[in-house]
Amino acid sequence: MSTTAAESALLGQTETFAHEVVRVLAPRWERERRIGREAVLQAAALGLTRLEVPEAWGGLAMSFGCKARVAEILGAADFAFTMSLINTQNVATKLARSAPQELARHYVPGLIEGRLLGCTALTEPGAGSDFAAIGTRATRTAQGWRLDGAKAWITNASEADVVLLYAQTEPGSGGRGIAGFVIDAHREGFVREPAFQLAGQHAIGTGGFRLEGYLARDEEMLQPPGQAFKAALGSINGARTYIAAMSCGMTAEALRIASEYGERRHSFGGPLAGHQGWRWRLAEASSELAACRMMVAHAAALIDAGADAQLASAQAKLLSTRMAERQLHVLAQAMGAEGLREEHPFGRHLIGARVASFVDGSTEMLLERISAVMRKPG
Ligand SMILES: Cc1cc2nc3c(=O)[nH]c(=O)nc-3n(C[C@H](O)[C@H](O)[C@H](O)COP(=O)(O)OP(=O)(O)OC[C@H]3O[C@@H](n4cnc5c(N)ncnc54)[C@H](O)[C@@H]3O)c2cc1C
């Protein structure tokens, strides 16, 4: 990826922030089962909540390739923090690019300053992979739209202030009837549920909420029926690519720690890295990581060029998440008992890689997408 001087400077600052702040605080966030709000404010001060936001809104308008690199660097320190931060960045970008001025003015400054958190809500208790089957209902009223239904498994839902939410306007019409709304989480009719208690990755702030007679004004319908379904799927290539980049970041960090440990720790008269069986495992991890990074860079370059990135992003995510799950196990094993210490990221990253295999298209949905592109005539 060719980077501008501004992007290189930002990437350098992101490296320092990831290493000195995120890596250090992540075990505490997991222990306390909460989003790393204090680091979100620091990330915002660096500009990481406005990477793609247009300059007219105080954004950095950086390339997608730069965003993917930021995702890899932060993901190496903590997958959960990165998920939370990127989701807020995505909401700020969407609102700045396409919301009516007054609505954008209401939310964008708070989001890019890290004071507000944003989330994007497709998934429901009864519909995950099958997005067209969502049941949250949007009913026309004299003043706008009345929303009723429930969302689940949403990043940042435990604390989000503003939600980009998808709802069905015409039951039975599938994707055609789905519309996108901007929801204020502090308005009447929004009922937040407690954060989900999971096997790990609590700094994602995963949770759910209900809409009980929530009233959205006309201008709060961001994407009308007919456009919303396509728009939601349109942004998924980017999401798949940055999740792949985060998977590479987690693997790279585990490889770095194991490589250093292998020179320090001795067994049978020499360092671990002196044993062929031990060091070959790391050589394999390094080679697979290099291949996945190339796939991520290829997908990011297509996105930046405005070209079709469906196949490249699905393939990059498929292989990078598989690589991360497999190699994180191998690298944790290479550490022996030491890898279990809380200050090392192996346990957190293993759950992070598990989450990466579901979000923004599960492994099976990626295989479906790749098959569909392969079977397309011509
Ligand atoms: C930590 C976390 C954060 C998340 N953040 C968000 C968010 O911010 N916004 C949001 O909208 N969603 C979010 N999600 C939800 C995520 O997008 C879903 O988990 C994902 O879409 C899969 O849906 P599901 O878990 O309901 O699985 P299901 O759809 O119930 O599927 C279960 C399993 O069956 C497989 N499967 C389903 N259908 C088929 C088929 N036709 N053929 C073969 N296999 C199939 C799936 O791949 C999966 O392995 C998040 C999830 C997690 C875990």
Image (spheres, grey):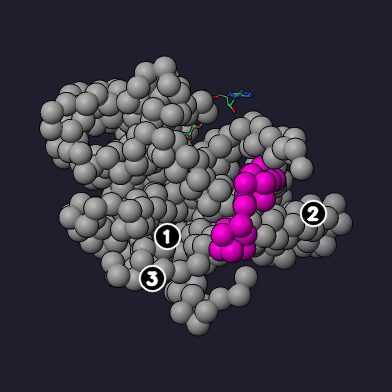
User: What's the residue type where badge 2 is placed?
Assistant: Glu
Q: Residue 304, percent across and down?
A: 56, 63
For disc 3, the neighbor class at 10 Å (few under 14, some 14 to 19, many from 20) is: some
For disc 2, the neighbor class at 10 Å (few under 14, some 14 to 19, many from 20) is: few
Residue at mark 1: 22
Q: Residue 285, percent across and down?
A: 74, 54
Magenta span dominant secondary structure: helix
> What residue appears at the point 62 percent right and 52 percent down from the top-left corner?
308
Residue at mark 3: 60
> What residue appears at the point 38 percent right and 70 percent down from the top-left corner?
60
> What residue appears at the point 55 percent right and 42 percent down from the top-left corner?
356
Q: Which is more N-terminal, label 3 or label 2?
A: 3
User: What's the residue type where badge 3 is placed?
Assistant: Leu
Residue at mark 2: 284
Secondary structure of residue under mark 1: helix
Identify the magenta region.
Answer: 300-321
Q: Nearer the viewer, residue 110 or 368?
A: 368
Q: What is the spatial separation of the Cα atoms under label 1 and label 2, in whole angstroms?
A: 28 Å
